[in-house]
Amino acid sequence: MDTRRESQVRPRSARKAVALPTAVIALMTVIGSATPARAENQTPATASATVEIAIPMGFLLYESKATRKRLEKSVVHTRMRWRTSDRLGEPLLIDPCATRKQTDKGRQAARTITGRSVSWDGDYSEQVIVYRNETAARAAVKGLRSDLRRCANRNRHLYRVKDTRIGHEAFMVNMWKVASIDGATVMRQGRTVAIYTSPSNSDGPDNPPRWRAVEYGGIEARKMAKKLAGTPL
């Protein structure tokens, strides 16, 4: 009798012992299949955390002129042909070493507007570059200053620099190129660098330049510094 009872009990206990691991395995399977789905649902949120920087349309001072299709009149009443570029690798408007390529690092957005005159009255241009942080922007300005010292007198060009008080840091550049003289102002406000170029009435490389803001884009640079202080990029 005892032998039969043992034989009847063992199968039940064996079935219960097998059922428990099966339930655990099923539960683990459900949890395991749910985990990837939850990770996939988090992927878009993670991706959206990285926000791309874009310069708003119409933010630059010369942009209204550049968007018009017909020939424009500048402040010196000469006809201009405007070109706008959002290319991130556009060279700096001031290129003393004639590299003709991007030499700074850390750019996240850029817009360059150039106005070429139909006559010989000079060209106007505007460039706004946003860097990943203020450190990268300062490094870009420092690199441009270094290039201006290193290539101050090269390829029949002559560059003179004078500091000015605009934004967080700024300086003016007198650029004598063979037979033409241009002025420029480089300004940094936070992590944004703006460059303006315009014709200059300086007396040439043999005489000290007249550092007048109106001839170096300084007025435009001051307007942009104030704009960036109110609406940082």
Image (tube, grey):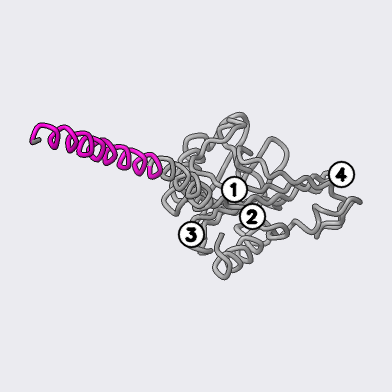
Q: Which mark is residue 109?
A: 1
Report, in whole angstroms, how far the alpha carbon at label 4 lies from the one at label 2: 29 Å
Crowdedness of circle 4 by 10 Å Cα count: few (<14), some, many (20+)? few
Does the magenta portion include 28? Answer: yes
Q: Position of residue 180 (x, y in %)?
A: 72, 41
Q: Which residue is mark 2?
A: 55
Q: Classify 228 as above or below 180.
A: below
Mark found first going from the N terminus, 3 or 1: 1
The residue lying furthest to the left in this view is 2
Amino acid type at mark 1: Ala
In the rendered image, the quadrant that contains the N terminus is top left
Q: Position of residue 38 (x, y in %)?
A: 45, 48
Q: Classify 121 as above or below 8.
A: below
Q: Secondary structure at mark 2?
A: loop
Amino acid type at mark 3: Gly
Assess whether mark 2 and mark 1 are in contact (beta carbons under 8 angstroms): yes
Q: Nearer the viewer, residue 183 or 222?
A: 222
Amino acid type at mark 4: Val
Report, in whole angstroms, how far the alpha carbon at label 1 lies from the one at label 2: 7 Å
Q: Nearer the viewer, residue 212 or 168?
A: 168
User: Residue at position x 84%, y 49% from top?
Assistant: 80
Mark found first going from the N terminus, 4 or 3: 4
Assess whether mark 3 and mark 4 are in contact (beta carbons under 8 angstroms): no
Q: Which residue is mark 3?
A: 190
Q: Position of residue 213 (x, y in %)?
A: 63, 61
Crowdedness of circle 2 by 10 Å Cα count: few (<14), some, many (20+)? some
User: Residue at position x 52%, y 54% from top?
Assistant: 162
